[in-house]
Amino acid sequence: MIKYKHGDLLANVKDPNVFIAHGCNCCGRMDSGFALQVKMMYPKVYERYLDAYEKERLSLGTIMFVRQDKDSPCVVNMQIQDG
């Protein structure tokens, strides 16, 4: 079942059973929009993303599942932009 909620998604999701999926570029940057909010709230997500970029493991269509810690939601970085 899909639940629709209004408000700040990142501030209101504390359930470790939740997945937050968002589109990312393959350029090693999370500098604007929702990606920037993810980067600021979940620094480990950005660290893993940057590590993959530096090891040339980011390409269109790849996905990455990352948790900040065991109690946080799982963030799914989906590489959907080449540039």
Image (cartoon, helix red, strand yellow):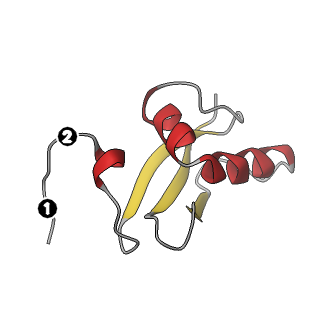
- Give the number of the mark in front: 1 or 2: 2
For the N terminus, give its image quadrant.
bottom left
Are discs 1 and 2 less than 8 Å apart at CB? no
Residue 14, quarter of the rendered image: bottom left
Residue visible at 12% across and 54% down? 4
Residue visible at 15% across and 65% down? 2
26 on left or right of 35? right
Instruction: Report the disc number at residue 7.
Output: 2
Q: Position of residue 53 (x, y in %)?
A: 77, 45
Indicate whether 61 appears above or below 46.
below
Closer to the camera in the image, 12 or 66: 12
Residue visible at 57% across and 60% down? 68
Q: Secondary structure at mark 1?
A: loop
Instruction: Report the disc number at residue 3.
Output: 1
Residue 64, quarter of the rendered image: bottom right
For the C terminus, give its image quadrant.
top right
Q: Position of residue 45 (x, y in %)?
A: 61, 52
Residue 50, quarter of the rendered image: top right
Q: Amino acid at mark 1?
A: Lys
Q: Position of residue 46 (x, y in %)?
A: 65, 45
Q: Position of residue 71 (x, y in %)?
A: 47, 71
28 on left or right of 82? right
15 on left or right of 69? left
State the separation of the CA atoms marked 1 and 2: 13 Å
